[in-house]
């Protein structure tokens, strides 16, 4: 079993839909949780960054972390065609001055149809 | 621009050759990371530098892979005797880490470049 599991999709939704993306993990030492968006032939772009459990909202994006279930989610409201990309979850156990290495999921490929 | 810059963007070479991949981090970022991303997979960690020294090289797959950061800014990933299995996108990331502080607020996120797409024929 991989440390981080993420359904690779593809996931196709109509414009305006609410999108739910999820990852599960096995390492209870993970403290930092991130969502990156990656367009084709581009590097990952940081979307959301949370510490420990709870919710965080930024515009149309909401990140949730449930450490008791080892489950994290990213919700996208009012999805747009420009949201079409691969979404990667990433996590780290490190604390203090450095994140050290991030553990990534495989990524979920999202397509938002006009 | 102000982001992480990686060169070349694409590299095609023959099996057995030596390659060097370059990363220019965001100005002022003390931490620098190398990852490798295969098709359909998430990035996998290779090595992490804090300043000039390699703080964690546990992700390097074997001794054909080596990385340096001699002046604490630009880094070069070097691959000797390349194999077809080395074909992947090599990503570099940097972050601003405040080593003097030991709190969760000083843990800074990593920002990625667009990678070098390496193809070994």
Image: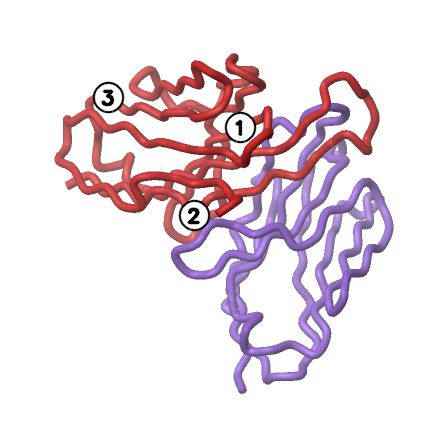
Chain colours: A purple, B red
Q: Chain of mark 3?
A: B
B22 on left or right of B98: left
The residue depicted at 57 percent of the width and 57 percent of the height is: A37
Q: Nearer the viewer, residue A27 or B51?
A: B51
Q: Quadrant of residue A11?
A: bottom right
Chain of the residue on which disc 2 is drawn? B
Q: Is B11 placed left or right of B3 in the picture?
A: left
Mark 3 is surrounded, within 10 Å at the Cα level, by few (under 14), some (14 to 19) or many (20 or more) other residues, namely some
Q: Residue at x 79, y 50 (%)?
A: A65
First along the sequence among labels 1 and 2: 1
Residue at (43% x, 26% y) in the render: B74
> Residue A25 sits in which quadrant?
top right
The answer to whether residue B62 is above or below residue A14 is: above
Tell me the element at label 2: loop
Give the residue pinned by disc 1: B32
A55 left or right, relative to A23 = right
Q: Quadrant of the C terminus of chain B?
A: top left
Q: Are marks 3 and 2 in contact (CB under 8 Å)?
A: no
What residue does disc 2 label?
B114
Cβ atoms at labels 3 and 1 below 8 Å apart: no
Position in image of residue A106 (x %, y %):
52, 50
């Amino acid at each position: 079993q991989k440390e981080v599991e993420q359904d690779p999709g593809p996931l196709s939704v109509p414009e305006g839909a609410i999108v739910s993306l999820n990852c599960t993990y096995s390492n209870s030492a993970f403290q930092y949780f991130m969502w990156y968006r990656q367009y084709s032939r581009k590097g990952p772009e940081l979307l959301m960054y949370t510490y420990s459990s709870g919710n965080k909202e930024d515009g149309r994006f909401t990140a949730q972390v449930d450490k008791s279930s080892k489950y994290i989610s990213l919700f996208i409201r009012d999805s747009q065609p420009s949201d079409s990309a691969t979404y990667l979850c990433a996590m780290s156990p490190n604390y203090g001055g450095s994140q050290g290495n991030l553990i990534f999921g495989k990524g979920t490929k999202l397509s938002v149809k006009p | 621009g102000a982001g992480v810059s990686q060169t070349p963007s694409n590299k095609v070479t023959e099996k057995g050759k030596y390659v060097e991949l370059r990363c220019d981090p965001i100005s002022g970022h003390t931490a620098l990371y190398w990852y490798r991303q295969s098709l359909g997979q998430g990035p996998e960690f290779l090595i992490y530098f804090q300043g000039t020294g390699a703080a964690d090289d546990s992700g390097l797959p074997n001794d054909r892979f080596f990385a340096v950061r001699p002046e604490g800014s630009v880094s070069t990933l070097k691959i000797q005797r390349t194999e077809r299995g080395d074909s992947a996108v090599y990503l570099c990331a940097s972050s601003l880490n405040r080593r003097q502080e030991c709190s969760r607020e000083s843990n800074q996120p990593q920002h990625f470049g667009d990678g070098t797409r390496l193809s070994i024929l």
